[in-house]
Structures are given as structure tokens and as C-alpha cells.
Image (cartoon, rainbow, N blue to C red):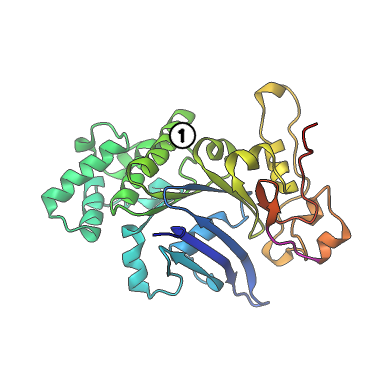
Amino acid sequence: MSGPLLEVRELCVEFPTRHGPLRALDGVSFDIAAGEILGVVGESGAGKSLTGAAIIGLLEPPGRLCGGQILFEGARIDDLPREAMRRLRGRRIGAIFQDPLTALDPLHTVGRQLVETLRTHLPLNAGQARERAIELLRQTGLPAPETRLAQYPHELSGGMRQRVVIALALAGEPRLIIADEPTTALDVAVQAQIIRLLRGVTQTHGASVMLITHDMGVIAETCDRVAVMYAGRVVEIGPVAEVIRRPAHPYTAGLMASVPSLSDAGGRLAQIQGALPRLDEIPSGCAFHPRCPKASPRCGDERPELALVQRTRAACWWPIVESPAP
């Protein structure tokens, strides 16, 4: 395949209300290459998880796609019939959900869930599926995988459950994995193990990963590129090192400034004034302009599109431009 593995083009999602539709995603565009990990970061409510749900066809009603296209391996998938999307999901696109306890069926053992998933997507008999399930759990670093097959989700710790969810996501040998906050509520040691595991997935299985998170540390450790979202739009996208060290969009710069630094111990953390707007109160022009220290009248009148700014692309009329070295 010559093009990107995943192409998202001008994706729009809306929620109908009595007072008219509310636009939750408004023209979201990005690509993910084969074997790449793309991080998607932003405040809660920015549209990160909604973007992932739209890609795998799991929008919660009454949410609906109202524009744009999603192409996977060069073929459009946003208009697939329900059954065709169900076959694609799990087999070619895997998902790691935010809460592993709710992502697993509490009434069935880990083994039954893994074996059923494997036999749904791969031509395996019961014995082969069981051996493959043990191997998947072993790959995720779960101790005593043979024993875990007979256990129920509530008998496992949070880190163990997350490993089972990752094993389920890998069961169909997908080309793309949507990982929605996979390290949330896990301790630092387990987070590091999950990060290494996701990186290993791209190297061992050749899969691509869309990593949705609010943790810039996880982004820095794991991703190749990062897309920063605000109010349902991508405001900056580029190589992770460039976006973190030399952000072009004022919102990205605010996010970076709010991350604690070991070199500035004891100092006050910077903060972005104001709050993310509600869907029915998104301002005209650049949605960030009421909170932006660089805002001008143009920012409230005209909405900027993503454009190249040095090494990244940013949607800003007054991007932060690094001064050339003397």
C-alpha cells in the first residue's frame, strides 16, 4: 500500500437538539502512516475520544457523522453498512478502551472472551484459539497467563485488566489500533509497561496506533507525531519533538507551559485562562481566541486553517515563530 494507512478528511460530527444541531467535530483532518503512533491530545471535551469513536463506527446516538470522509487502506469506511463495519472492527481495526473494567464482560472469564474473539476473526478451532489466547496474554506481560484464562475481570487488578483489553485488541491481528486513554488510573510503573507494550506492537506486529490521551508525558515517550485538538478541531500537528519543544499554536504552548518541570521545582505552574467552550457557545473565528494572549480582531472574525509553520502545521493567524539562531 503506497498511501497512509488511515486518512481522516474534514470529519464532522453533530448532535441534534431541540434548538438545532451542535457541531462536536468540525473539519478534523489527519493521516496515520503504517507502523506510526499518532498521539491525539487536548483538554477533556476537545473531541479526542469522539474522533476515535467516529473512526471505528461507535458513535453514541444521537451523535452522527455529518460531513467528511474516513479512508482505511485506501477505501472509504465511514459509509459502510453496519455488518461490514462490524467485521472490519476487531479484525482490521482494534480498540483499547479507557476503562478496562467496563470494556470486559463481567459475566464471562477472560479465556472465554479471548477465545470467542479469536474464533470470530481468525480460522481457529477451540484448542488453537486457547493457545493463541495464552500467547497474547504472555506478549502483554500478564503473569501466569494459563491461570488468568479461568479468572473473571473483577479478579484482576487494573493493570492486568488493561493487558487483557490490549490482548483482545491484538486478537484479530489488526493494522490499526485506537487506544483511548490506555494508561488512565494506572500507577506509574504499570503506565511505563503499557507504553513499552504499545511501542512494541508497532515493531512486532507492524500495526499503527492512534493514542488518545491528555498526558503529555505519555505522548513524549510513545508517539512519533502528535495532533493537538481544541473545541472539535485540530489546531496543531507535527513531529512530537517539534510540537513539544517548539509549539507554534498558543494553545499548544499553554499546554506545554502547564506541565511541571524538574528544573523549576517549587515554582508556580502556568495556566491557560478561561475554560473550553460548551458546544452551544463555540465562538466564531478561532475558537481559542477568547483565551489567547495573542488574539487580534481578525481571530474573532476569521477561522484559520492548518498551515505550515516552520516544522509543524498550526491553525493560527499569529503563530509562535522561533527566532533564527544568530
State whether residue 155 appears in this view: yes
Q: Residue at x 83, y 49 (%)?
A: 294
As drawn, 232 above or below 291: below
Asked whether 302 or 89 is in front, the reply is 302
- Reading the image, the residue beneath label 1 is 191
Residue 79 rendering spot, x and y as whole percentages = 44, 75
Q: Residue at x 27, y 40 (%)?
A: 137
Q: Which residues are magenta?
A: 302-306
Residue 102 colored magenta?
no
Instruction: Identify the main secondary structure in magenta.
Output: loop
Q: Is residue 171 left or right of residue 215?
A: left
Q: Is residue 123 left or right of residue 143?
A: left
Judged from the image, the secondary structure of the residue bearing numbered disc 1 is helix
What is the quadrant of residue 152 in the picture?
A: top left
Query: From the image, which quarter does the C terminus lie in?
Result: top right
Residue 207 rendering spot, x and y as whole percentages = 38, 49
What residue occupies the far right of the structure in this picture?
297
Asked whether 21 or 13 is in front, the reply is 13
- Count numbered badges in the picture: 1
State whether residue 149 appears in this view: no
Residue 303 colored magenta?
yes
Q: Residue at x 36, y 45 (%)?
A: 166
Q: Is residue 138 left or right of residue 74?
A: left
Residue 157 rendering spot, x and y as whole percentages = 36, 36
Query: From the image, which quarter does the N terminus lie in?
Result: bottom left
